Amino acid sequence: MHTAIIHAIALFAVALTPTQQAHVKKLEHTLMAPCCYSQTIDEHMSQEAADMRAEVEQMVGNGKSDREILAFYRKKYGETILASPDGLSGTLLAVVPILLCSVSCLFLVLLIRGWNRRQGTVGRIAAPGITIPHGAELVKRIRAETGEF
């Protein structure tokens, strides 16, 4: 019954201007089909999507703004009706994983640095205070200690 009413209203709707038709297409790309939320209503072939397309066209023909139409569907179905969430919720979805990864990496770096400080500097061979000779001085010292000249 609901579907028949919507189709009857759509038949008596005024022809849309090119600007209004562009608004309808934009909104059809923005709204998800409420039967399964797998596609937007412009792509989905369900009866629910067809009903929503007719409703959107009717609302645009009646002069409702994009904001009013989206608010109507958000109130009716919740935030999941939008193909891409708007406002703070969309921003948080993008920022939280990046922030979490950054904090984890910082924690890991600080943990490794602390571990290295407790173990001694990485790559240190001798105990603190002992110097290791290099090059010709090292060869000279080895020969002196082993008795080779």
Image (cartoon, rainbow, N blue to C red):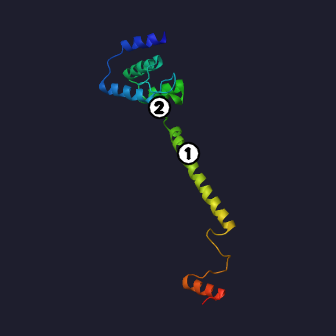
Disc 2 marks a residue whose amino acid type is Ala
**Residue 132 to residue 67: above or below:** below
- Disc ID at residue 19: none
Residue 65 visible to the viewer: no
Quarter of the image for residue 29 reads top left
Q: CA distance from mark 1 to mark 2?
A: 20 Å
- Disc ID at residue 97: 1
Quarter of the image for residue 119 reads bottom right
Task: Give the image location of residue 136, x and y in percent.
Answer: 55, 85
Answer few, some or many: residues within 10 Å of disc 2's Cα (few below 14, many 20 plus, some between 14 and 19).
Answer: some
Disc 1 marks a residue whose amino acid type is Pro
Residue 60 visible to the viewer: yes
- Secondary structure beneath disc 1? helix
Q: Which residue is mark 2?
A: 83
Which residue occupies the foreground of this view, 19 or 112? 112
The residue drawn where x is 54% and y is 42% is 92
Which residue occupies the foreground of this view, 31 or 146? 146
Which residue occupies the foreground of this view, 126 or 93? 126
